[in-house]
Image (tube, rainbow, N blue to C red):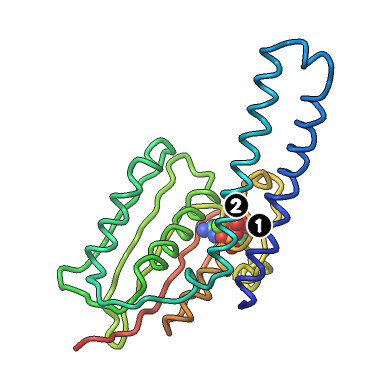
Amino acid sequence: LSELQKDFVDNMTHEFKTPLTSIKLAASVLSESQPIKNDTRLEKYSNIIAQQSDKLTTHIEKLLDLIRSDKIFNLKMEKIELGNFIRNFVKSLDHEFKDKNTEIKVEIPDQTIFVKTDKYHLNNILYNLIDNAIKYNESEVKKIEIALKDMGPYFNLSIKDNGIGINEANIKDIFKKFHRVHKDNIHDVKGFGLGLYYVKNIVKLHGWKIDVHSKPDKGSIFTIHINKEYE
Ligand SMILES: Nc1ncnc2c1ncn2[C@@H]1O[C@H](COP(=O)(O)OP(=O)(O)O)[C@@H](O)[C@H]1O
Ligand SMILES: [Mg+2]
């Protein structure tokens, strides 16, 4: 197992299985108690808690197996047209982010841009970056700009937001595993601090690079430098 896989497995085990074990234990204590046994309606509910937490446990086990099995960490490279890929990706976000006062602008040159990538992971990379751009954003209208640019020897794919930004002291650490910036007003935002660690690793496996520029209270821009593989 790679270090990244092991982190995922350990973290998932702790974050999901520990609470589930407590829920199941509590449900079984409840279902054995006399007041519940005497009330068919309550008995039904306590059975639902037990059954559904069993179901969740099974799902999580399956997910952990998938992560352990290496499948999702092996890149399956193929040739894709990046402009269309990004347009389709943004279309697929429409319904997820439409209620969140979010504007997503896409800027793609007219030329066709062929790159070699693993579509599944590229999708996850974009999703993670855009999820962050929206999560760590307190602007009334959250403005996200996705731009693709031909830089000569490589392509730049950038995701820009008008969010809370990241200060100097934290910026060098955000790609590290489990790193989350502590901020009074945003500490309730959910996350594991693994998103950018995953992004960085997958970018590296492609032979690409990622960097970030950010200003507190102004916003951030993450840029992926993509090698030209074709013509
Ligand atoms: N676009 C962004 N704007 C401001 N802060 C960000 C942005 N993206 C990431 N961060 C900071 O970097 C940390 C690490 O991000 P990530 O690895 O995706 O973990 P998570 O989102 O699960 O916390 C976040 O907790 C947040 O503090
Ligand atoms: Mg994240």
Q: Quadrant of the C terminus?
A: bottom left
Does 136 sit left or right of 18 as displayed? left
Q: Secondary structure at mark 1?
A: helix
The N terminus, quarter of image: bottom right
The reply to whether the C-beta atoms of the residues labelled 2 and 1 are less than 8 Å apart is yes
Q: Residue at x 81, y 24 (%)?
A: 32
Ligand 1 closer than 8 Å to label 1 CB: no
Q: Residue type at mark 2?
A: Ile
Residue 92 lies, in percent from the top left, at 32, 49
The residue positioned 41% from the left and 38% from the top of the image is 101
Foreground label between 2 and 1? 2
Q: Is residue 11 above or below residue 228?
A: above
Label 2: few (<14), some (14–19) or many (≥20) C-alpha neighbours in 10 Å: some
Measured as percent of width and height from the top left, residue 229 is found at 28, 86
Residue 60 badge: 2
Label 2 SS: helix
Q: Residue at x 60, y 71 (%)?
A: 5
User: Dividing the picture into quarters, in which one does residue 156 lie?
Assistant: bottom left
Residue tagged by mark 1?
12
Displayed quadrant of residue 113 = bottom left
Which quadrant of the figure shows ligand 1? bottom right
